[in-house]
Each structure stands twice: as C-alpha cells, then as structure tokens.
Amino acid sequence: MSTVHLSAITKQFGKVTAVEDLDLLIKEGEFFTFLGPSGCGKTTTLRMVAGFYYPTKGVVKFNDRVMTTVPPEKRNTGMVFQNYALFPHMTVFENVAFGLKVRKMSKEETKKRVEDVLRKVRLDQYAERQVSQLSGGQQQRVALARALVIEPDILLLDEPLSNLDARLRDEMRAEILRLQKEYKITTIYVTHDQVEALTMSDRIAVFNSGKCQQVGTPTEIYNEPVNDFVAEFIGETNLLGVSEAGLGENHRLYHVGALGSKVKVNNTSLNVAGYTENDELRLSVRPEAIEVSAQPVAGENVFPGKVKLVQFTGAAVHTYVEMNDRLTVVGTALNQGPSTYLKEGAEVYVRLPEDQIRIVPKAGV
Ligand code: ATP
C-alpha cells in the first residue's frame, strides 16, 4: 500500500496545458476518484501517476519515494484501461499471467497467483477461454485480474465501466469496490460519471479545464460545493445570479436579479463559504430542496410561479416552474401518488429554504 502525493504538477502538450499546478494527497488504501467533463485533464493526471507521462513541472511521490520520472514498469502500479487493452487471441489465463511472465516469475508461482486472482474475480471457470469469446463484463474482470495479479501498490482505473450497459455497470461497480476493500489497495478511479463517483469514492477531486476545483468526500462535494461549476457538475441544481444585499444577525440577504426580489440565506459557513468581494455570485439550490405547492406556503423565500412542465420519472416527479416571466426553477419531489401531481399552467408557490441555499462564486476558468 502506498500514498500518492502530487505537488504543483503541470503538464503541457505543446501549447495545451492539460493539467495546471495540481496538488493532491491520496491516502493509503483510499478509493480516490478524478471526476470531470471530457478534456479536463483526468486521464493525463492518471498517466502521470502511472508513469506513461512525466510532468512538465512538479513532483510525484509514492510514500516518500520521488517517482516523477521513474518509468511505468518500475512503479508497481496496476492499470485498467477503458478499452481493457487485452490480447484478444490469448486465453484468460495467458492474459492475466502476462505481467508475471515479464517479471520472470516461476511457472508454479505464476499458476498459483493467476488461479487465485481468477477465483477472486469469479472467472476461475474461464481460464482457458479466449478473451474474444467473453462478454464485455467478463473482459472487464480479466482486465481487473491482470492489474491485480502483480500485487500492485496502487490500482489505476481509467473509465473502466464506460463500455458496459447500465445493469452491468452497476454490477461491476460493486465488484470493483469489493475487490478494492479485499486487497485494501490505494485506488485512483477516473470517470466523468457523477453517480459512479458519488457511490464509489472515499474522496473525489473535481476537475475542470486542467485545474482541480474541489477535493472532498461525496457528501461534502454535493452539499458544500465551492463554486458554481462543482454545484452544477455534481447532481442537478438551480443556479441564479445574485448580489449581496444586506447582513442580518443570523442571515444574509441576496438580490436575485431574475426574480426582481431578495432571498434570505442562513448565515452559516456551509451556506456562504469561500467567496471574496470581487467574485461574481450564484445561488445554488438543489431541486429536491425546493418546495412547490398549490397552496400558499409559510416561511421565508416564497415566490409565486406557474407550472410549465411536469416530468414523471417513476420514483420522483420534476416540476418546472416559471417565475417572474424570466426564470425557470426545477423542484423534485418523491412520487407521492397521482393526487399530488401539479398540473401544467397551475399557479403555484415556490419556497427556497434558507438553510438549503448555497451561495457560491462563479468558477474562474
Ligand atoms: P476524457 O474524459 O475525454 O478522456 P480527460 O479529462 O481525461 O478527458 P485528458 O485526456 O487528460 O482529459 O486531456 C486533457 C487535455 O489535454 C485535452 O485538451 C486534450 O486534448 C489534451 N491532451 C491529452 N493528451 C494529449 C497529447 N498526448 N497530446 C496533446 N494534447 C493532449
């Protein structure tokens, strides 16, 4: 097991800065996810941990060992690629044994290790099958077995589930977590899928445009986003431009331009953390926090609106409400049965609960 420490890492490809001044400390045994949209620098960072790329600037350490320019085969990392990168005409056994053969391990030890890891990924019945005759999920297990069989200090997974259908993806998520806990291995997982990141990770680093925006546990990232990019990228949210309009004893007031009105926000660090005077501000409120009702609603921050669209998703109902002719907010409620569904065109009241609102700065790019 190993920690991974990236200090002031920058990677440039010609004029393109793929990763800029990145600091990250990944703890021993942690399941750590790099999350972000396409092109934000996740894979480049992972490849610098693997040693396939060396940083233009900065230092990579595993525990206290400087690894910045150590070649990949000397890092003892196991990597799983999006396209699995298996040898299609070799058997499952041969694919998994490959790394051990390169390391010149004895035949007996190789056999023992490969059989052991194939049992762990539940492919022991398939050892002699050609990889090209396996399903996508089975191929994914071979790729995992191949990464684990060398007993790596660090497991690196680059979008390993993106080629699988939704049901298999769920299954493999659980499978990867089970193996990670069993091997207690420091793991870095790259994905652009927020559900994957939220459900699997001990901690997540959210990337955008080559920069890390926030590092935190899934609940911290979801409940306390540091800027509008993180709020919008993780989960659904309503973002409204605001400006400061006053300070009370336990609350702050913000002017919401599109509503032509003020909102009250509880003055806790959770709600109004981390912005400075010159920042452009946004209010973020999750759809599930918004109350939409046909009856007048008691409390602060209640605004009139008109239902534009009701979207039924099974477990939940999304209600799109137009307010002040300029702004549509979405409220999401659990499905409480047909009698509770609002009708399109209905006049409603919308409450933005003052303890659920987050005031965040606009992300600088
Ligand atoms: P994706 O999810 O699409 O793989 P990503 O977040 O992993 O995206 P990277 O692959 O790390 O993003 O790419 C970051 C930026 O660096 C992109 O602008 C990309 O075009 C650029 N880039 C990556 N690899 C190279 C390369 N070998 N040569 C030139 N530019 C590159």
Image (cartoon, grey):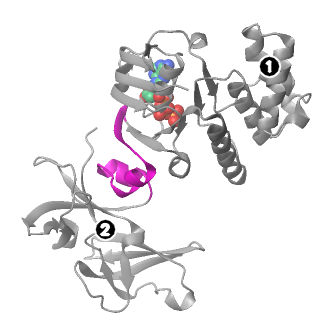
> Relative to 213, does residue 345 appear above or below in the rendering?
below
Is residue 218 covered in magenta?
Answer: yes
Residue at position x 49%, y 38% from top?
Answer: 32
Q: Which residues are magenta?
A: 209-235
Q: Which residue is mark 2?
A: 356
Q: In which quadrant of the rendered view does residue 148 lie?
A: top right
Answer with left or right where residue 360 lies relative to residue 345: left
| Residue situated in front as seen by the camera: 364 or 152 | 152
Per the rendering, the mark at residue 120 is none
* Above or below, 192 relative to 106: below
Q: Regarding mark 2 in the picture, which secondary structure is present there? A: loop
Q: Quadrant of the N terminus?
A: top right
From the viewer's perspective, tell me whether residue 278 is left or right of residue 15. Answer: left
Residue 81 shows in the view: yes
User: Residue 295: x and y, percent?
Assistant: 35, 92
Residue situated in front as seen by the camera: 214 or 28: 28
For disc 1, the marked residue is 97
Q: Residue at x 25, y 81 (%)?
A: 302
* Quadrant in the picture for residue 305: bottom left
Q: Position of residue 271 (x, y in %)?
A: 25, 60
Q: Quick one: which residue is furthest to the top in this view? A: 104
Determine whether, in the image, residue 79 is placed left or right of residue 263.
Answer: right
Residue 104 shown in magenta: no
Q: Tell me if residue 17 comes above or below residue 288 in the rendering.
A: above
Amino acid at pointer 2: Gln
Which badge, 2 or 1, is on the more N-terminal residue? 1
For the C terminus, which image quadrant? top left
